[in-house]
Image: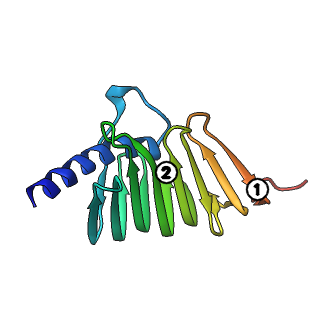
Amino acid sequence: MLRLFFIVNIVLSISAYHLTAFASAPAKEEEKRPIIITSETLTADSKNNTATFDGSVVARTDRITIYSDKMTVFYGNSKGKIKKIHAVGNVKVNKKGKAMFSKDAVYFNDEEKIVFTGNPKAIEGENLITGKKITFYLKDDRAVIEESRVILQNTQELK
């Protein structure tokens, strides 16, 4: 039991450090902030190198908030480096006036990208972007939308 408690603490510490990358473009070391993850349950699986947060998951930093029904953190056995994070069910990502919704989202640490699938949509103000798949590259602050549909609100009056 003590070993499980130790593993859970390590996983949470590692998750807090690396989920910041999920939350925002890479920042200088001194700019990284901790993340607070709440859920109904947490299951740490040291054999499979995963930590699964289940039920009303909220991952929050000072820059971004991620909501989902379930979030699984996959980490390597070498120093616990995060490989990927998989959020499933009612995924919602909020960041300074922007929101992204989908049924499924996967963050890939090495590539610094998030792939949204399952009716993904992005909303900024009154503008809406939908597609089959939306891939957001954190490092470049750019997105690639497959089978896109964009609705831009025209705020200029025609003369």
Residue 153 at what x, y percent from top left?
75, 59
Give the CA distance from mark 1 to mark 2.
Answer: 22 Å
User: Does residue 122 appear to the left or right of 91 in the view shown?
Assistant: right
Q: Residues within 10 Å of mark 1 (few under 14, many from 20)?
A: few
- Where's residue 70, x and y in %? 41, 68
Residue type indicated by callout 2: Lys
- Residue 78 percent location from the top left of the image: 33, 37
Q: Nearer the viewer, residue 10 or 133?
A: 10
Quadrant assignment, res 54? bottom left
Q: Are marks 1 and 2 in contact (CB under 8 Å)?
A: no
**In this rendering, position of residue 24 left or right of residue 80:** right
Residue under label 2: 95
Disc 1 or disc 2, which is closer to the eye?
1
At 79% from the left and 53% from the top, the residue drawn is 156
Q: Quadrant of the N terminus?
A: bottom left
Q: Position of residue 80 (x, y in %)?
A: 32, 41
Q: Is residue 110 above or below residue 102?
A: above
Query: Which residue is pictured at 22% across the width and 46% down the height?
Result: 10
SS of the residue under disc 2:
strand
Residue 25 appears in the rendering: yes
Q: Is residue 66 above or below residue 112?
A: below
Q: Residue at x 63, y 68 (%)?
A: 118
Which residue is labeled 1 in the image? 146
- Asked whether residue 125 appears in the rendered view, the answer is no
Which kind of residue does numbered mark 1 sit on?
Answer: Glu
Asked which secondary structure carries label 1, the reply is strand
Residue 154 appears in which quarter of the rendering? bottom right
